[in-house]
Image (cartoon, rainbow, N blue to C red):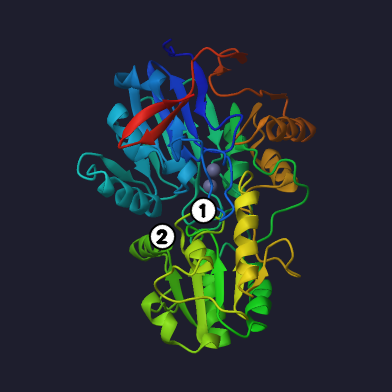
Amino acid sequence: MIPEQPDLWFLPLGGTGEIGMNLNLYGHDGAWLMVDCGVTFPKPGRIAADGTVHHRGEPPVQMADPAFIADRRDRLAGLVITHAHEDHVGAVPYLWPLLQCPIYTSRFTAEILRRKLAEFDLLHRVPIIEVETGQSKQIGPFSVQWLALTHSIPDPNALMIRTAAGNIFHSGDWKLDEQPLVGHGYSPKTFTDLAEEGVNAMVCDSTNATVSGHSVSEATLHAGLLQAIRSAEGRVVVTCFGSNIARLHTLASIARETGRYMGLLGRSLINMSGAARAAGLWDSADQLINPGHLGYLPRDEVLAVATGSQGEPRTALRRLATGTHPDFELEAGDTVIFSARAIPGNEESIKALVNRLKELGVRVITAEDADLPIHASGHPAQEELELMYKWVKPAIAIPVHGEAEHMETHADIAKATGVPRAMVGRNGDLFMIRPVPGIRRQVVETGRLGWQKEGLVRVE
Ligand SMILES: [Zn+2]
Ligand SMILES: [Zn+2]
């Protein structure tokens, strides 16, 4: 199966029909371009009384099987990573040895990627080309332009992929945030300009296609988090996704306003803040203290930010809940704030964690029961999808990054907004965009690989 000069194809191997492990291929003129290479985590199985999750022996880290493209890697022109979330970049250290192609990405994402590669002793083997937002790169027969959009991590990019056969707008993960607080914003003109040029297909995020309205801006969370932290008497621990640097910025300003010292607990938080600093995205006014000092401060001067919002084992918040964290112990009257949503499948382990905290006498505030918003989604709700379709005016809408229900609803929104055609499929389907649009179902065998005992195994 080789795309010819008049062909423009889209072939997802992961992330279409599911949320997680994105791995997309574009085919044209004898070559393939890969966009994103992420991981997913197995659905939790049994939960023990102590909240430990048992995965029935499945590898804890899983990713799309790249066999199709690994078998023809001489035709793989390059890999583009849209942003630094695990479901987009996480599989690179595991799969790059099978691909061996250059990687193109933005500066913050490159910082995160280099840290991952270093752990696998791959840092000096993988060519990483850093691209500025707005810049274009010729990658084989694909001219790829990085476009500014907003999401819940610094430096997210959409892509305009131009070829001699046609153009594709690949949205990546996005929302429309007027005040993202960190990094670049977005401009509607970027997208209305694409419509003038002509977009054959728009491959777009479906995560929140079933959610009405418009996502909440990062900037509006300040009020809700300030209210929750100001009313607390003892120590405050906030748990959130470590990659959300804007959220850390908001918490650091609230620490200043409430006379608390902020410290980070957990490897991923420390890693992400370090990458933000290296990429010039950390506000120098946002001071952090050594977390080892938190235990010596008066309780009402502590603001700890901890990993573990999903109830995962071995994370900082779980250690605090079980009294096994080296830096301090939670006591009755302390407050834990969940500035995060539950990823579907994690509800039970989060509930077990919350119960454990309550048994200690800790006050728990979740995003669901707070009076004001203390968490914002990074994905477009229905009004944002409508706006983007009105701006980009693609000939074909291709929903991805969602389960079947999200993608079907997304397709209806696109059509209601005036897009002539929507194509809904799943991993392994070949979406032919040019010259004649159509889908060939299940032309490529797909599957999952897992990382276990330092090697890749097939997951059934
Ligand atoms: Zn994603
Ligand atoms: Zn993302």
Q: Tell whether 286 sits left or right of 354.
A: left
Residue located at (56% from left, 18% from top): 429
Q: Residue at x 46, y 53 (%)?
A: 155
Residue at the spot of label 1: 312
Tell whether 205 sits left or right of 87. Answer: right
Q: Residue 14: where, in percent of width, then height?
A: 51, 29
Q: Which residue is mark 2?
A: 272
| Quadrant housing the N terminus | top left
Residue at left 75%, top 41%? Answer: 210
Q: Is residue 379 left or right of residue 89?
A: right
Label 1 Cα crowd, 10 Å radius (few <14 / some 14-19 / many 20+): some
Where is residue 295? Give x, y as percent.
43, 82
Quadrant of the image occupied by residue 240: bottom right
Where is residue 453 drawn, in percent x and y? 32, 37
- Is 373 situated above or below 457? below
Q: CA distance from mark 1 to mark 2?
A: 18 Å
